[in-house]
Image (tube, rainbow, N blue to C red):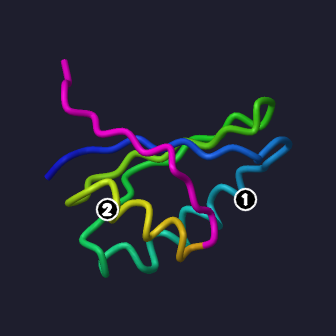
Amino acid sequence: MPKFMDVHDGFVGGTQEQLIEAHNADLAIEGEERVHFEKAWLDPVTGKAFCLSTAPSKEAVQRIHERAGHPTDQVYELSIEV
């Protein structure tokens, strides 16, 4: 299954607890779209959050994030890995 990295903006000053809460919201419903969010990272200085997932499509990742309350249109397929 393809891997994806997505980027969220607007989390300046975010905390680990907030990242955990957002990640858990994704995990609670990810199976409905056959998505699995593997990891999440946050840079509270720039306000950027990053999620690594496996999914059948970019659109499936977007649907889960939207339903979980943190939509993004910045989803990138990671088609080359070393």
What type is the residue that disc 1 sits on?
Glu
Q: Within the magenta stretch, is there residue 68?
A: no
- The Cα atoms of the two marked residues, 2 and 1, are separated by 20 Å
Residue 37 place in picture, x, y as percent:
38, 58
Q: Residue at x 85, y 43 (%)?
A: 13
Q: Residue at x 54, y 42 (%)?
A: 7
Residue under label 2: 36
Residue 56 vs residue 12: left or right? left
Does residue 46 lie above or below 30 as drawn?
Answer: above
Classify mark 1: helix, strand or loop.
helix
Majority SS type along the magenta span: loop
Does residue 39 lie above or below 57 as drawn?
Answer: above
Q: Residue at x 58, y 61 (%)?
A: 71
What type is the residue that disc 2 sits on?
His
Crowding near the residue tagged with mark 2, few <14, some 14–19, many ≥20 C-alpha atoms within 10 Å: some
Q: Which residues are magenta?
A: 69-82
Classify mark 2: helix, strand or loop.
strand
Placement of the C terminus among the 4 image quadrants = top left
Residue under label 1: 17
Q: Residue furthest right?
A: 13
Residue 79 vs residue 67: left or right? left
Res 30 label: none
Q: Residue furthest top?
A: 82
Of 8 and 51, which appears nearest the observer?
8
